[in-house]
Amino acid sequence: MAVGLFGGSFNPPHDGHALVAETALRRLGLDQLWWMVTPGNPLKDRNHLAPLGERIAMSEKIARNPRIKVTAFEQALGQSYTARTLEVIRARNRDVRFVWVMGADNLKNFHRWQDWRKIVATFPIAVVDRPGSTLAYLSSPMARAFSSARVDEDDAGTLAFRRAPAWTFIHGPRSGLSSTALRSAKSG
């Protein structure tokens, strides 16, 4: 079984997130995608973070595809760092082929994540296009450091079966929605 892991604060989740998830399911040939709502991102301000239960409920409304499973693994594991969460998920699901899925807008700060190189060395990664990030991803520290591990987009369907490090950039339909803008509009 091939499973995409799509983590984030989803504060709030929106149709742009669903578009990334659907694009990953389709283009990567995944059996499932686990939409992992985090208790909080250590790199983001938690002052305006909606309660986890609320973000999970909103994510479930947006993630309409039955192959998308909304989860709160990190809270259940008592984790706040992706690398550790992924270690546990892999240890508990040895027969599953995982791909880490992220929007291209997150790639610019990926090098600030704890143990980001370990994530790249352990999981194939699919970076899904987001507005304003189409060309910027090329200059990200991850893209530069692992340029030789880049898989052609035409071969994205093989990513789950490749040994890490392996990553691809997937172009496709994009949504201009952003959680930051939605929070600002709500409070303003």
Image (cartoon, rainbow, N blue to C red):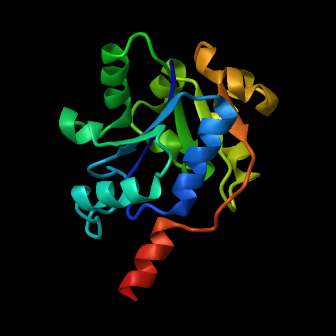
Pick out the residue farthest to the front: 66
Total numbered circles: 0
Q: Is residue 17 above or below residue 1?
A: below
Is residue 14 visible in this depiction of the protein? yes
Residue 11 appears at what percent x and percent y? 38, 62
Residue for point 29% across, 70% down: 48
Q: Quadrant of residue 133?
A: bottom right
Q: Is residue 28 above or below residue 176?
A: above
Residue 129 appears at what percent x and percent y? 68, 50
Residue 17 appears at what percent x and percent y? 52, 55
Q: The C terminus is located in which quarter?
A: bottom left
Pick out the residue farthest to the bottom: 188
Q: Is residue 148 above or below residue 56?
A: above
Is residue 78 visible in this depiction of the protein? no
Q: Is residue 14 above or below residue 111?
A: below
Residue for point 71% across, 41% down: 170
Residue for point 30% across, 16% down: 92
Residue for point 54% across, 62% down: 15
Q: Quadrant of residue 59?
A: bottom left
Residue 182 appears at what percent x and percent y? 46, 75
Report the front residue among 8 and 54: 54
